[in-house]
Image (tube, helix red, strand yellow):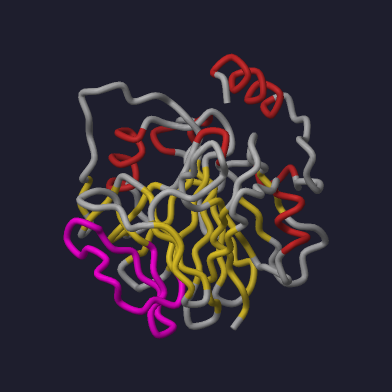
Amino acid sequence: MRPGLYRAVVLFVLMGCSISAPPTSLPALQTETLWNILAPGLEQRVYQPDGNFLGQLHVLRIDPTVYTFRAHYQPGEPLGIARWAEALSSPVAFVNANFFDPEARILGLLVTDGVVYGQSYQNRGGTFAVQNGIPRVRSNIQEPYQGEALDQAVQGFPMLILNGENVYSTQQRDAVARRTVVAQDNNGRILLMMTPLVGMTLTDLSASLAESDMQIIHALNLDGGGSSLLYYDPPGAEMPFTFPSLDPVPAVLAVYVR
C-alpha cells in the first residue's frame, strides 16, 4: 500500500469508521489494566506501553490445553477479515500470518494440516509451529527447520523476544507501523497481539514486550502494516470483535476450541 494511502486509511480508522468488516464493539478500544476472561482458557487485554495510546496492543492470551491452532492459506486469493471469517469454520480468533509477495504467495514456510508450502527462512526470523498437538514459538537461527513433520506452522521476522530478552534493534530505518505478533509466555500460553491504530517501530515493540508484565519467553513479528488484522469471537459473545486489515491477506493463523 502506498504510504499516503496508508496514512489516510489510518486516519479513517481513528475517526471511528469501519472498513468492510462486521461491527466492532467500541469497548475493545478502551485501555484495560487487567486481563478480561472471555471464556475458560481465553483472556483479553489492551496493553498500552509507556502511555502510547496510538501504539496500544490488543492481546489475546490462549491456553493451548483448551484451544488448538491451525494455519490457513489461499494462494493467490487474498481475503479481507469478513471473508476470512466466512471461509473458516467457527474460529474463536485469527490473525494475519506470513509475509507475502505481490502475487499473494506466502514468503517463508507455512504448514497446514501437515501440508507444506513455501521455503523456510534461513538465518532469520522465527516459526510458530504446532507439533504433535503442542504449539511453540521458536527462533529459526537457534532451531532451524530441517524438514521435520509439523502439524501447523507460520513464519515471520524478526524475532522480538528470545528467552525472555529483547533481541531486536536496528540502526536502519525502522518505521512506525501496525504490527501483528505471536508470542509464548512462561506458562506455555500463546499470545496473539495486534496494534489496531498507528502502531510502533519494531525496536520499540521489542523493548516494550520485554519490559511488560506478560512474562513473554519468545515473541515473533508477523506481517504488519496494511496486513495486520485481529478477529475474535468468544463463546457467548453477541458479535465478534474485528480489527480489519487495510489489505486482503492470503494466510491467517486461527484458533479453535479443542
User: Residue lying furthest left in this view?
Assistant: 142
Depth check: give the residue in front, 143 or 32. 143
* Residue 104 percent location from the top left of the image: 57, 44
Residue sitting at 58 percent across and 59 percent down? 73
Name the spot of residue 67 as percent of width and height, x first. Answer: 55, 77
Q: Residue at x 46, y 62 (%)?
A: 117
Find residue 125 and report its horizontal and vertical position in percent. 29, 50
State whether residue 38 is above or below residue 244: below
Magenta stretch holds residue 33: no
Q: Quadrant of the N terminus?
A: top right
Res. 136 image quadrant: bottom left
Q: How many marks?
A: 0
Quarter-wise, where is residue 216 in the image?
bottom left
240 relative to 101 in the view: left or right: right
Residue at point 20%, 60% (across, down) = 163
Q: Can you say whether 250 is above or below 41 in the image? A: above
Quadrant in which residue 7 is drawn: top right
Horizontally, is 16 left or right of 142 in the view? right
What is the span of residues highlighted in magenta in the rendered image? 128-152
Position of residue 42 measured from the top left corner of the image (x, y, whole percent):
57, 69
Q: Is 144 located above or below residue 158 in the figure?
A: below
Quadrant (top left, top right, bottom left, bottom right) of the C terminus: bottom right
